[in-house]
Image: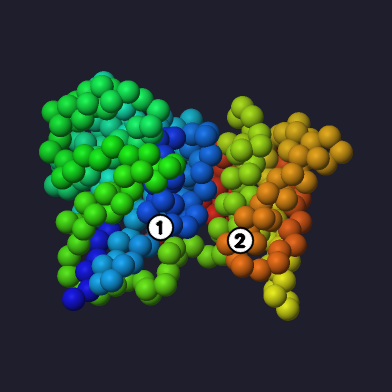
C-alpha cells in the first residue's frame, strides 16, 4: 500500500534547513550558503523509498522583513506551513526558545500540527548545551521526536527520515518515483548561479541580486545558457564583474561545473550583469524574477 506525507521544514534563517533537505534527498535541490536568507522560494524535495513517498518543503527563514522581497519570503513560509499537517522545526543549540521559534510553536498549537524538532550543527557545541536545548523545547511543545544532527556531515539524517515515517498516511503518490524535485531545470540553474554570488560577495550586495535564464539551447548533448544577473546599484555591478572580469569569470566557472553535474551534460554558460535599482521594493520586479506565490 502506497503512503505519502507532506512535511514543511521551518525555522529562522541560516540554521541549515536547505542543507538538511539536500541531505535527506541525497542530491542538491536547494542552494546553500553561510549567509542568512539564502532561500527565497519554497523548494520541494521528494524522497521515495519502497512504498513511501515524502514531500518536503524547504521554506525561507522567518525574520523581520525590511523589503517587499522579505515580506514575500515570510509570507511564503507561512503559507507553506498552512498547507501541511506536519513540520520539522530546525534550530541550533540554545538554552532558551527564541522569539521566532516561539512563534512557530504557537502556530503548531493553533493549527493542531505535529512536529519534529531537529537540533542542527551539534558537532559545533557541547553536549551540555544540547541537553539544555532539549529541555527548553520539551517545556514549550510536545514534539513527536527530538533529534540532534549535523546536516552538513549527514550525522543523524537517517534518524530524521525514520521519525518522519510516523507522519505517513495511505494514499496515492503525487510525484513519479524517480523525481527528486518539481523545480524546472532552468530555475535550478538560476539558483546555482545565485548561490555562487552569495558565496563570492560580501555585505549586502548578494542579497540584492537576482538571476534569470534568458536563453536555453540544447544541441548534440551540449546546453548553451545565457543568464542575466541583476543587482541594485551601478557600483555593485562593478564589484560583481571584478577587476578585468575576474570575479564574474570565477562565478561562471563554479556555476557551470555544478550545472554540468546536475544536468549530466556539457554546458556553455554566459553571464551578463544588469542594474535594476531597488528591485526588491517593486512588486512587478519581484514577480518578474520568479518570486511569486505558489498555486
Write down the residue under mark 2. Answer: 261
Colour scheme: rainbow
Q: Is residue 268 visible?
A: yes
Q: Is residue 66 above or below residue 246?
A: above
Instruction: State the mark number for residue 168.
Output: none
Write down the residue under mark 1. Answer: 25
Residue pictured at 55% horizontal, 48% vertical? 286
Q: Is residue 110 above or below residue 192?
A: above
Front-most of 221 and 230?
221
Farthest bottom residue in view: 220
Q: Residues within 10 Å of mark 2 (few under 14, many from 20)?
A: few
The total of numbered circles placed on residues is 2
Front-most of 230 and 12?
12
Q: Position of residue 48 (x, y in %)?
A: 33, 67
Whole-Å distance between the Cαs marked 1 and 2? 16 Å
Q: Toward which corner of the image does residue 25 lie, by quadrant? A: bottom left
| Image quarter of the N terminus | bottom left
| Image quarter of the C terminus | bottom left
Q: Is residue 90 visible?
A: no
Amino acid at each position: 500500500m502506497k503512503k505519502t506525507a507532506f512535511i514543511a521544514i521551518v525555522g529562522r534563517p541560516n540554521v541549515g534547513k536547505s542543507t538538511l533537505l539536500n541531505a535527506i534527498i541525497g542530491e542538491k535541490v536547494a542552494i546553500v550558503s553561510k549567509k542568512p536568507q539564502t532561500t527565497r522560494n519554497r523548494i520541494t524535495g521528494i524522497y521515495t523509498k519502497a512504498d513511501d513517498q515524502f514531500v518536503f518543503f524547504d521554506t525561507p527563514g522567518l525574520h523581520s522583513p525590511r523589503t517587499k522581497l522579505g515580506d514575500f519570503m515570510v509570507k511564503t513560509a507561512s503559507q507553506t506551513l498552512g498547507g501541511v499537517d506536519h513540520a520539522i522545526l530546525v534550530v541550533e543549540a540554545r538554552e532558551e526558545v527564541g522569539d521566532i521559534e516561539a512563534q512557530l510553536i504557537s502556530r503548531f498549537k493553533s493549527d493542531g500540527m505535529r512536529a519534529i524538532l531537529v537540533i542542527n550543527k551539534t558537532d559545533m557545541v557541547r553536549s551540555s548545551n544540547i541537553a539544555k536545548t532539549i529541555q527548553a523545547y520539551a517545556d514549550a511543545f510536545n514534539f513527536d521526536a527530538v533529534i540532534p544532527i549535523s546536516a552538513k556531515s549527514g550525522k543523524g539524517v537517517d534518524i530524521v527520515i525514520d521519525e518522519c515515517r510516523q507522519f505517513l498516511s495511505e494514499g496515492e503518490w503525487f510525484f513519479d518515483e524517480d523525481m527528486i524535485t518539481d523545480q524546472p531545470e532552468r530555475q535550478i540553474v538560476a539558483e546555482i548561479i545565485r548561490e555562487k554570488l552569495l558565496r563570492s560577495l560580501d555585505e549586502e550586495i548578494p542579497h540584492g541580486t537576482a538571476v534569470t535564464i534568458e536563453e536555453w539551447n540544447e544541441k548534440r548533448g551540449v546546453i548553451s545558457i545565457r543568464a542575466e544577473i541583476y543587482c541594485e546599484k551601478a557600483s555593485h555591478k562593478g564589484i560583481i564583474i571584478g577587476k578585468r572580469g575576474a570575479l564574474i569569470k570565477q562565478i561562471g566557472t563554479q556555476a557551470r561545473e555544478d550545472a554540468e553535474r546536475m544536468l549530466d551534460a556539457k554546458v556553455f554558460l554566459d553571464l551578463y550583469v544588469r542594474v535594476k535599482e531597488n528591485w526588491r521594493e517593486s512588486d512587478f520586479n519581484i514577480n518578474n524574477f520568479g518570486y511569486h506565490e505558489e498555486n
